[in-house]
Amino acid sequence: MTRTFARYLADLAERTAATFVQAFAAALLLGAHYDLSAAQAAALAAVPAGIAVIKNAIGAFLLRRTADPTPRTGAAYLVDLAERTVATYAEAFAGALILHGTLSMSVLDSALYAAVPAALAVLKGGLARFVGDSATAAFLPAEKDPGGPLGSRPA
């Protein structure tokens, strides 16, 4: 397995796990309002995580994005954080729409629900400046992060 491929896999795992945790936390926080069981909350988190896998796999492998050798700092961090936040919202909203009939959630409820995982993505991205590589919104250490100083960030 090449080093770049291993880093893409680490990035994919980090993004997928983060999406699941954020969506699950949102479902648990809002579970009483939407009358969700733990199993329904897990399903509501699993669908966006699955969408995250598909989105990132298509972007990284099928479109054969090339590596960018420049470190991500300053405004690039904000772009990374914005992309992760928008992607998390879209994935959570799509997941809620897919399950809205089963969960008795309206489209508006789905949109409102999706805002919570997106807000958690912003919080996670801010914490990542102190936990992971400070140049990205990921919790991955620099040697595993495709956006870190070692440079294999997808374009």
Image: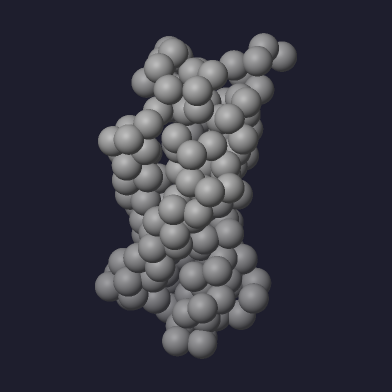
x then y, percent, for residue 153:
45, 22
Q: In the shown orientation, is residue 46 left or right of residue 92?
A: right
Is residue 144 positioned above or below 45 on the image? Answer: above
At a point 28% along the width and 36% down the height, the residue shown is: 75
Q: How many dots with numbers? A: 0
Q: In the shown orientation, is residue 144 left or right of residue 147?
A: right
x then y, percent, for residue 35:
51, 86
Regarding residue 138, the answer to whether it shows in the image is yes
Q: Quadrant of residue 46?
A: bottom right
Residues 28 and 40: in front is 28
Question: Which quarter of the figure is the C terminus placed in?
Answer: top left
At a point 54% along the width and 37% down the height, the residue shown is: 133
x then y, percent, for residue 122:
40, 56
Q: Quadrant of residue 41?
A: bottom right
Question: Which quarter of the figure is the N terminus placed in?
Answer: top right
Q: In the shown orientation, is residue 102 left or right of residue 72?
A: right
At a point 32% along the width and 35% down the height, the residue shown is: 74
Of all residues, the one furthest to the right in this rendering is 1
Regarding residue 50, the answer to whether it shows in the image is no
At a point 46% along the width and 43% down the height, the residue shown is: 137
Is residue 12 positioned above or below 139 on the image? Answer: above
Residues 50 and 1: in front is 1
x then y, percent, for residue 25:
55, 69
Residues 10 and 132: in front is 132
Q: What colour scheme does the image use?
A: one colour
